[in-house]
Image (tube, rainbow, N blue to C red):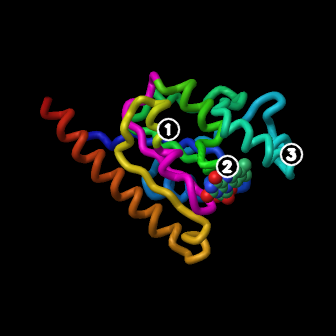
Amino acid sequence: MPAARILVVYFSRSGVTARLASMLAGALHADLEAIRESGADRDPARSGVRGYLRSVVEAVRQRPAAIEPSTHDPAAYDVVIVGSPVWARSVSSPVRAWLVAHRASLKHVAFFCSLGGSGAANVFDQMRMITGKPPIAQCEVTASDLHAGKDQRLIAEFAQRIGQRLTVLNTVEWTL
Ligand SMILES: Cc1cc2nc3c(=O)[nH]c(=O)nc-3n(C[C@H](O)[C@H](O)[C@H](O)COP(=O)(O)O)c2cc1C
């Protein structure tokens, strides 16, 4: 049976989600893609108090950001794992934009988010609604998990759940 092709896609304003995404991609031997903003939405537009407030407003209004085209073709992957910071208990606007642009080409999905402490369940609901797909696994990492040094274990367990689910899905698909 060939190895599953896995893509990890994420947006990160201040580096936390980026670090989790690269740990995950390393654990799963996956390709990694950072969502890049385009035009007026590009950094430093997200920096400072103005950038913070702008991000809150976009998240609350469920407005997708302007983003650059994807460098990897999501249709070429068995599973795409999408990571977002939680913004105002919502998915971040660049991740919303990426999901809207690519939802039709996603085969299987898994979701993860990084957050201060509240809103992960709402973010996972939004990601599921946008893609129209139930995730094969999901994982949240809070600021207190980071401070307690639990992030590596949480990501390793998440990677393991994805691996197990892919084995089951592959078996089902090969027997049909
Ligand atoms: C605009 C904005 C809104 C946020 N809203 C929330 C929130 O509703 N709940 C929460 O737990 N954390 C919230 N946070 C904290 C981030 O989710 C958290 O710091 C995350 O780890 C940042 O990820 P990043 O470094 O990849 O950007 C917010 C941060 C920003 C910038």
Q: Please indicate, yes or no, whether residue 18 appears anywhere in the rendered image.
A: no
Residue 83 x, y percent position in the rendering: 55, 47
Q: Label 1: how many residues lie within 10 Å, few (<14), some (14-19) or many (20+)?
A: many
The residue carrying mark 1 is 127
SS category of the residue bearing label 3: helix
Type of amino acid at the residue the image marks with label 3: Arg
Query: What amino acid type is highlighted by mark number 2?
Result: Ser
Magenta-span inclusion, residue 122: yes
User: Badge 3: how crowded within 10 Å, few (<14), some, or many (20+)?
Assistant: few
Q: Kindly identify which residue carries mark 2.
A: 12
- Disc nearer the start of the sequence (3/1): 3
The answer to which image quadrant residue 97 occupies is: top right
**Cβ(mark 2) to ligand 1 < 8 Å?**
yes
Q: Is residue 57 visible?
A: yes
Instruction: Say above or below: 115 vs 72.
Output: below
Instruction: Please provide percent x and percent y for residue 143.
Output: 61, 67
Q: CA distance from mark 3 to mark 1?
A: 26 Å
User: Could you say whether the residue bearing mark 1 is in a helix, strand or loop?
Assistant: helix
Write down the residue under mark 3: 50
> Which one is nearer the viewer's eye here, 3 or 34?
34
In this rendering, is residue 104 above or below 152? above
Q: Residue at x 79, y 34 (%)?
A: 41
Q: Position of residue 2 (x, y in %)?
A: 29, 40
Q: Give the magenta range.
A: 104-124
Mark with earlier residue (2, 3): 2
Name the one closer to the observer, 129 or 79: 129
**CA distance separating discs 2 and 1:** 16 Å
In the picture, the quarter occupied by the N terminus is top left
Nearest-to-viewer mark from 2 and 1: 1
